[in-house]
Image (cartoon, rainbow, N blue to C red):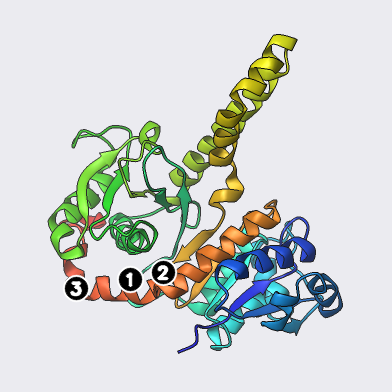
């Protein structure tokens, strides 16, 4: 049975058509069984495809010259989504013309359009934005939510854990992913009441959910490789993600300055170049590009707006793997394995108040 097509918003991102097409072409070399629906300005897409005959042979073009800009507010994007490249790519998923959509456009607009068009899955109250972060371990760590929901209740956090674990089984191959809640300490008494309630629910449901849950983790442990899934609200998650990305840039810039500060430093750089190249590869955000909106009736993947062609290729590859492994169906199956009432805290928010 043939796999569903991947719809690519060819107009999104800082450099638009050229990088998006080049990235899709690179991804197809790794996933040559997939076909593509390229959404955007047809003349520009055809011109870019001239250098990529393999992608051209496996792609259809859906024309529009209307684009959601980086300055558009989500409310503005929703009003004009229907005729834009982003809106049409997501609608292709809804109509069954594609199995997933990839865009490097405006994150807030993408979230709003995707949620309105595809709706959330049964059993999921809110979708979450999940991404892979590099670690010192054998596998990357999945972190969610990274900005889709600034405020979350206990039930949201528990659902995020279910979705993150399903993604982790695809990304890591681990049948019982190690799941932790992000907190200011690892002790059971630390954190807000919502976090402590979520920990209680997850601990009780861990066997039914096939996860390994042992409470909390702190931000300085995110990249140690001891955890497969880190769950938090979108406000804390977005701050933590940007802190990690900023630290990576700081380390890279510091090394660059150090190695160019003197002749001796330059010689030292030449000697240590294999190690620094490995570090550069590990810290390069393009190698971990591709954040996923989990919990929707369809797969939508967000690429960094500034991603290179290699970064776009990685985002498309993430999309392909999620389709190959039926991650949406996995989440549905995991939710069906437990009584929904068991995913609720023992006390309601009204009772806590």
- Does residue 27 sit above or below 310 in this rendering? below
Tell me if 24 is positioned left or right of 156 in this view: right
Tell me the quarter of the image containing the N terminus.
Answer: bottom left
Tell me if 44 is positioned left or right of 108 in this view: right
Task: Check disc 3: other Cα within 10 Å, few if <14, some if 14-19, many if 20+.
Answer: few
Distance between mark 1 and mark 3 Cα atoms: 10 Å
Viewer-closest of 202 and 344? 202
Task: Where is residue 102? Give x, y as percent.
Answer: 60, 68
Q: Residue at x 14, y 60 (%)?
A: 207
Check contact, mark 2 vs mark 3: CB within 8 A.
no
Q: Earlier in the sequence, mark 1 or mark 3?
A: 1
Asked if residue 80 can be seen in this view, the reply is no
Check contact, mark 1 vs mark 2: CB within 8 A.
yes
Label 1 sits on residue = 331
- Does residue 301 sit above or below 100 in this rendering? above
Viewer-closest of 151 and 266? 266
| Callout 2: SS | loop
Task: Where is residue 269? Give x, y as percent.
Answer: 65, 21
Q: Residue at x 39, y 72 (%)?
A: 325
Label 3 sits on residue = 337
Q: Residue at x 27, y 75 (%)?
A: 333
Task: Check disc 1: other Cα within 10 Å, few if <14, some if 14-19, many if 20+.
Answer: many
Distance between mark 1 and mark 2 Cα atoms: 8 Å
């Amino acid at each position: 049975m043939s796999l569903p097509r991947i719809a690519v918003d060819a107009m999104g991102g800082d450099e638009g058509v050229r990088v998006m097409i080049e990235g899709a072409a690179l991804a197809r070399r790794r996933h040559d069984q997939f076909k593509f629906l390229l959404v955007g300005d047809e003349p520009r897409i055809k011109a870019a495809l001239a250098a990529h005959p393999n992608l051209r042979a496996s792609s259809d073009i859906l024309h529009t010259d209307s684009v959601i800009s980086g300055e558009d507010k989500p409310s503005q994007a929703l009003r004009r989504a229907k005729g834009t490249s982003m809106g049409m790519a997501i609608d292709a998923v809804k109509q069954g013309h594609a199995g997933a959509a990839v865009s490097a456009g405006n994150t807030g607009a993408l979230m709003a359009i995707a949620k309105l068009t595809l709706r959330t899955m049964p059993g999921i109250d809110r979708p979450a934005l999940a991404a892979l972060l590099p670690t010192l371990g054998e596998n990357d760590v999945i972190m969610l939510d990274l900005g889709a929901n600034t405020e979350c209740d206990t039930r949201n956090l528990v659902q995020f854990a279910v979705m993150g674990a399903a993604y982790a089984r695809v990304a890591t191959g681990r049948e019982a992913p190690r799941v932790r809640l992000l907190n200011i300490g690892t002790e059971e008494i630390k954190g807000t009441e919502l976090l402590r309630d979520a920990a209680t629910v997850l601990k009780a449901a861990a066997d039914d959910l096939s996860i390994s849950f042992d409470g909390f983790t702190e931000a300085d442990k995110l990249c140690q490789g001891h955890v497969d899934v880190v769950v938090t609200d979108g406000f804390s998650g977005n701050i933590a993600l940007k802190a990690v990305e900023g630290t990576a840039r700081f380390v890279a810039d510091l090394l660059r300055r150090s190695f160019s500060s003197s002749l001796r430093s330059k010689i030292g750089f030449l000697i240590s170049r294999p190690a620094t190249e490995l570090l550069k590869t590990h810290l390069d955000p393009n190698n971990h590009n591709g954040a996923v909106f989990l919990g929707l009736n369809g797969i939508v993947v967000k690429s960094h707006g500034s991603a290179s062609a290699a970064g776009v290729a990685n985002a498309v590859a993430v999309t392909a793997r999620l389709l190959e492994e039926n991650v949406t169906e996995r989440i549905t199956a995991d939710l069906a394995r437990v009584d929904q009432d068991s995913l609720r805290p023992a006390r309601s928010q009204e009772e806590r108040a």
